[in-house]
Image (spheres, helix red, strand yellow):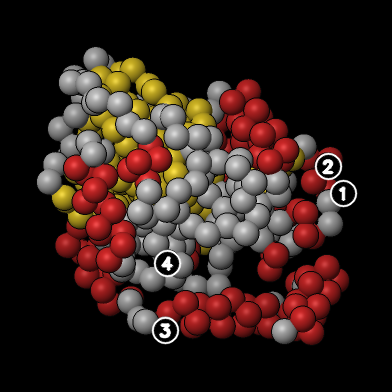
Amino acid sequence: MSFKLICTGDVMLGENVHHFKRGIVSGFNGKYPSLISENVREQLSAADILLMNFEASLAKDNQLQKMKIDRAVYVAPVQSLELLKSIKTQVVVSVANNHFGQHGAASAKESIKILEANGILVAGKNNLPVEIEKNGYKSSIYGVSLVKDKHFSGSYFKSNYSDLIEDLQLSKKSEYEIRIISIHWGEEYFTLENEKQRKLAGELSAAGFDYIIGHHPHVIQPYSKIGNSSVIYSHGNFIFDQNFSGLTQKGLVSTISIPDGKTELFISQQRKFRVTGLKPVSPEQLEKFCKSAYHRGKPVMMRIKMKLELLLKFYELNWPIIQTFTLRMFKK
């Protein structure tokens, strides 16, 4: 008997430095479940397991309100978990990413404690998987980041392209085991995967991983089959306050039937931070879209757009944002 795994793009329920006091936390205080429309919630609730990449640490609501900008960015209030709890299924989050750990080991440890206290399973704390028994199958869900992180304090599982297989210290795969890995990799804002991603995906497939669930670029990348393994190189953003570009407001949602591996893909759409709908897309349509959106200069172009959004919304800016970017200019 099969069961359904659904994977989404990045989930960041706090505010980045561009949106401090004018983004998700400010706009959805007390109403976090409304960040996704009812039809999207219903579709996600059809999962037996929902896997997300959780790109923020957590703090109590009253503590977050008192934090200065440098400490408050990429921090979500505990009440934001009401969104995940409103999706009626078992939620698993990977915390193996740079933004989850950027405020240090103590913050990350407390955030994991809060997540687990709210019934959310946490992958990526170390190289051990979250294990879920369902319909006679054991799903082993790993989380890892391969992205450079100047704030890294050992608070999540981090490796690199060369050493990941060894660092995972995998045991022999059992007959009814399904291996899934949520992996933070690739290059920001490129809509096509790079050679290092392709090579490692092949190695993970050979190591017995059935589903390779990619994150980090903030834009979507193609779906591929390598042997019996399904690879989605990047799911892009699901909920993230990167509203400076249409590309960063789109994400992939993959629906996977286990054990037969039938995969359905959907493009999620954010409008004013809310996920308003899911549109079916075939692997061929996805690849065509990713190729058409690709440009070698895309990272530079996207960062220019990011700054243009600040200029166009100058009337929303507050003193902490203005001060932060003024100081950055003088440091350069």
- Res. 251 visible in picture: no
Measuring 29% from the left and 33% from the top, which residue is drawn there? 179
Q: Does the CB distance between marks 3 and 1 fall below 8 Å?
A: no
**Is residue 57 left or right of 315 when viewed as pictured?**
left
Question: Which residue is denoted by mark 1 in the rendering?
Answer: 66
Pointer 1 local density, CA inside 10 Å: few below 14, some 14–19, many at least 20? few
Look at label 3 and name its amino acid. Answer: Gly
Tell me the element at label 4.
loop
- Real-space CA distance between mark 1 and mark 2, rounded to the nearest whole angstrom: 5 Å
Label 1 vs 4, first from the N-terminus = 1
Look at label 1 and name its amino acid. Answer: Lys
Look at label 2 and name its amino acid. Answer: Gln
Question: Which residue is denoted by mark 3 in the rendering?
Answer: 297
Depth check, mark 2 against mark 4: the one in front is 4
Measuring 62% from the left and 32% from the top, which residue is drawn there? 112
In the picture, which quadrant includes the C terminus?
Answer: bottom right
Give percent across and percent down for residue 300.
50, 82
Question: Which residue is denoted by mark 2 in the rendering?
Answer: 63
302 above or below 145? Answer: below
